[in-house]
Image: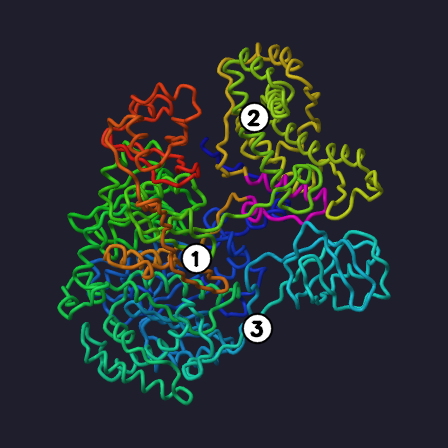
Amino acid sequence: MVPRKRPETTKTQEKALSESEPSRMMQKKEPGSSSSAAASDISCPSDPMEIDEELYCQQLAVYGIETMRKLARSNVLISGLSGLGAEIAKNLVAAGVKSVTLHDDESVQLCDLSSNFFISEDDVGKNRALACVPKLLELNHAVSVSTLTDLEPSKLSDFQAVVFTDISLEKAIECDDYCHNHEPPIAFIKAEVRGLFGNIFCDFGPEFTVVDVDGVEPHMGIISFISNGNPAEVLCVDNQVLKFQDGDHVVFSEVLGMTELNDQKLRRIKDVTPLSFTLEEDTTSFGRYEKGGIVTQVKQPKVLKFKPLRDALKDPGGFLPSDLCKFDRPQLFHLAFQALDKFRNDFGRFPAAGSLEDAEKLIALAVEVDGNIGEGGFAEIDTKLLHQFAIGSRAVLNPMAAVLGGIVGEEVVKACTGKFHPLHQFFYFQSVESLPVEPLNPGDVEPQNCRYDDQIHVFGHKLQKQLEDAKVFIVGSDVLECELLKNLALMGVCCSAEGMLTITDDTFIEKSNLRQQFLFRDRNIGEAKSTVAADAATSINPNLHIEAFQIPVRSGAEDVFKDAFWRHLDVVSAPSPPPNVEATDYVLARCLYFQKPLLMSRILGTTCNTAMVIPHLTQYYGMSGDPPVKKKILVNHTIRYFPFKIDHCLILANNEFENLFVKAPNEVNSFVSNPFDYIPSELKSVTTAVRESLERIADCILGGRCQTFDDCVAWAIAKLEDYFEYRVQRLTTLFPQDATYPFGAPMWHAPKRFPKPFDFSFVDPVHISFVMAASILRAETFGIPIPDSVLVVLPDIVHHRFLMDRVKTAADLNPMLDHNLRPMKHGFVLWAFEPGDYKNYHMDFIAGLANLRAKNYRIPEVDKLKAKVLSGRQIPLVSSTAALAAGFVCLELYKVLAGGHSCEDYCNSHANLVTPAFSVHKPLPPKVTEYRDMSWTVWDHWDFKEDLTLGELLRWLDEKHIHVYSFMCDGIIVYNTECPRRKERPDKRVVDMARIVAKVRLVPGNHLQVQMVCKDDQGNYIDVPPISISL
């Protein structure tokens, strides 16, 4: 259903609504408007600043509204617009800073087109900073983008953070000294990409306060006992594991008896166990604990001290590792980058590609630098690694720029907001395993005066040709796939006449996609994601050969993505589950069968994971992928009657939304289309689910049938009173506050919370908001026009509710429904909302119902955005994480297309930009099954022709001492040894059995895959490869 425009509200109600939804009623910020950029202003929460929640919804789910407001008041300088600078600028403009100022003294060169996606061949010869401005302005109209030509340290005072991507150490030290000593300090970040090596340095001043170290919500516990002692022992209920740590500060509330603890004073705890902790306080003189109580963690800010660059170079302290298996490499790279700076100063250039002489000079400079740090011997000199570093140091590779650009983008956000723990202070990253296995000769890396010269400089002509000739399949066009598509276009993948990139996605662009999926613009809203993404990628590289589809990749899509299509591919990229486990499993199965490399990736908020599935070298995702998410099984009684967390309230609210606006319309439509067959069929099995279904039908057709908008408002008020007054009254009447179990224990013990009912109030803005959302959704369901100003009609509606006796049996409902169907107008149809469509008032209803229920039980309430995240209706995303993950994937793509790499060369990566933390581990090899004189892995299958009969298959397997117990096609059992008619089928073709029994659609040119359950001669089950029958 097309979402309706939000009705206007009257001025008399705007104040009430602004108290409950402040972010909606704020004054609009003019794009590009300027204000004081002093760092002291950033922490001011009262500064009016509108954040478009629909536009930034995914990012708000990560940062929160206050962090976004701080970000929207931040001014950032980026000096150096190579590929790394462009990535950083893109991430910051998408994030929504106030302004980005660009500086670069260099002109655009042809080789810049392999890493900077904001420029084209027409820009060659222009200033790099000026050339980037137009497309950056397109990305986010609310962000001011300008350039700076004469960069002096004194001009840095206009910014909260400055980033340098191509600057000498001498100049960097000068700028950092100014930033470090400025009052207030200016965050200084220096980053470089040199071939397959990169580094980041952060200096946020002498003292920098981190407001929120990890971004995790404060933990809480429900108290069951507190001792009178010094120190006091605190026990918590046994169904909630405490997540406190020694030294945490907490506050107490709702404690009965020992009420002295309810003063909201910060108290320190120690000796934390999963169910208890020690309170560092003397409670011997306090009242005796009776019952109840909540203990809540109070997160404390953390103050970090940063060294200036001139001191950190000589005394770097610890390094943030990127690969724990190579813990000694950061020390070597610390020398290498300083040696490279000296080389450039001495010779006025980078080491020449393939020049062993220049590499030896750089190694000598590294040894010299090593002698100047402490007493020497800072790092072991690895000459081979330094040769690789020197030879490719002139190049800026797009995947490396994406990785470091993602990290730096997030570090700037931290510097401007104090949200999350910053990098402290050096970080070195390398991907030397991406180099071809065969050594490169000087002739292999000679420049060709083309846009790919930087890539040729590192990998040689042969791999560049393999990139251009590749056949690649990308599943999806979301934020991660857009980043990947951009990278491939810059790298020249699929850019020759032989190459082809295929992308498919059956979804369409929404406003919320615009900030993260940077290939989309306002004008693209409503268009197919895959088509727009393909067009945008072609604008980055006109030589890209790309074909876009709007077809979901799943069983049944074989008419388009036939066997010939899969055989033609070189590599596939797909997101790892969630969200679409079924599609991922299908793609994985196809890659296993056709033995195609699958590069999997996943992002969630500030974390990302990549997993490489390489034919015959690695396990597949189902064996070595992410562990399954552990979900707590909640008792239905807890959700319905005894909630004690906002999560419980949100589960109920989601269920009610589904019942009222998804299930009910569908059930009524089914009933109205054939009422006389519907009820008798239900009478056969009158279960609780059937009774609830019939009650929903009755609510829509009988008493709750709405014909005007006034009816919808009255229905909404009746629902509010039913949810929060009458149901609670019935519960507390049945189980009063002093109720006990038969064995004497109080029923309302922790974690249960005794509820209090309330009735509808016209002056309560939360009540009004809920009624407005519910009445509008009800009106849309019934196709009733909605007034332009909804709140005008609310006070004029008679305060009444619909009454309907509970239906005890389906037979009681039959005559009533039959009577009320006769006067119905012809063509009566209710609109059914799609389960995943949470536009307009959907989340208003869910959040309102959850918060009002929380009010019944004195549970802390949440805003709509938080409700959306907690209920799983909003996936948190930031563009920096997507850039990082796409960079990881493309570094692996070099290895895949070059070929010849071992399993140890491939990397599965995990990154968390909050802490920050990075880890790389090697994929495991596939399990080898050995049976008699045969062996196989998950990558193998047994091939047969179409005329294979069941008898021939069984005999072939029997000869190998493999005995079939059953086999299935598309999850349906086609043959089983226990079937009485199994002897009648030996002469039947297997494909005919699959078509008749499993209803498999056979497509000529494709194949039929048969999964078998088999035993050996001793009756033991054995795993065997699937059977593949060519069609």
Within 10 Å of disc 2 (Cα), the crowding (few <14, some 14-19, many 20+) is many
Residue type, label 2 = Ala
Q: Position of residue 662 (x, y in %)?
A: 53, 30
Magenta segment main secondary structure: helix
Question: Is 485 left, or right, of 74 in this rendering?
Answer: left
Q: Position of residue 561 (x, y in %)?
A: 28, 36
Which label number is shown at residue 95? 1
Q: CA distance from mark 3 to mark 2?
A: 54 Å
Q: Position of residue 4 (x, y in %)?
A: 48, 34
Question: Is 694 left, or right, of 474 in this rendering?
Answer: right
Label 1: which secondary element: helix
Mark 2, residue position? 664
Badge nearest the viewer, 3 or 1? 3
Q: Nearer the viewer, residue 781 or 149?
A: 781
Q: Nearer the viewer, residue 246 or 755?
A: 246
Residue type, label 3 = Val
Asked if residue 490 lies in the magenta stretch, the reply is: no
Q: CA distance from mark 3 to mark 1?
A: 25 Å
Of the residues under marks 3 and 1, which one precedes in the sequence? 1
Within 10 Å of disc 3 (Cα), the crowding (few <14, some 14-19, many 20+) is few
Q: CA distance from mark 1 to mark 2?
A: 40 Å
Q: Nearer the viewer, residue 795 or 307?
A: 307
Specify start and end residues of the magenta stretch as a single range. Answer: 843-871
